[in-house]
Amino acid sequence: MAGTSFKEATFNEAAKYIENLRTVGPVKTGAHCKNKWAMLKQIYNAIELYWSHKSGCHWDNERGANIEGPAAEAVWEEYVSRKPNFPMKSFKNSGWPYYSKMEEIL
């Protein structure tokens, strides 16, 4: 599981950098960036845990878990109903476009 994090100064610099890209919403702070990074790592780790530790499960970046049929649907719903697996809920039939970028970083 990925555990990489950054120092506060890195998050503060990231906030300064993205300020020039902001079109709407509040000014981002280092704390905003740190929280977003934590969320991204949580999603990445959930995907890694799902496809590498759950026998017979599928994962790809286009179709996600690719759940098809009532039996697979029932197993999926039971799996994502548990709190640690909840980040996977969005990826029932669609992938995560940031997976490969996160893989490069972590």
Image (spheres, rainbow, N blue to C red):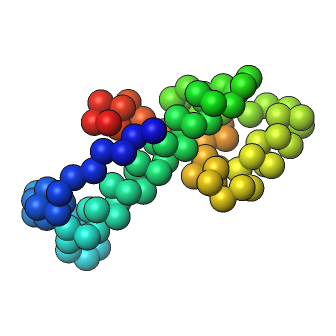
Badge count: 0
Provide residue 99's location: percent of width, then percent of height. Answer: 42, 35
* Left or right of residue 67: residue 37: left
Q: Quadrant of residue 75?
A: top right
Q: Is residue 72 rendered to the left or right of residue 44?
A: right
Q: Residue at x 62, y 36 (%)?
A: 50
Of residues 28 and 81, the one nearer the viewer is 81
The answer, for residue 41, to whether it is visible in the render is: yes
* Residue 94 figure quarter: top right
In the image, is 76 to the left or to the right of 39?
Answer: right
Nearer the observer, 12 or 96: 12
Quadrant in which the C terminus appears: top left
For residue 61, above or below residue 33: above
Q: Quarter of the image holding residue 8? A: bottom left
Residue 101 seen in the figure: no
40 versus 105 height, above or below: below
Q: Residue at x 49, y 47 (%)?
A: 43
Residue extending furthest toward the right: 70
x and y percent of residue 83 in the render? 66, 59
Instruction: Find residue 65 and report its horizontal and vertical position in percent.
Output: 65, 33
Q: Residue at x 21, y 52 (%)?
A: 6
Q: Position of residue 52 (x, y in %)?
A: 58, 27
Q: Is residue 26 above or below residue 58?
A: below
Residue visible at 74% across and 23% down in the picture: 56
The quadrant of the picture occupied by the N terminus is: top left
Give the side of residue 47 with respect to residue 103, left or right.
right
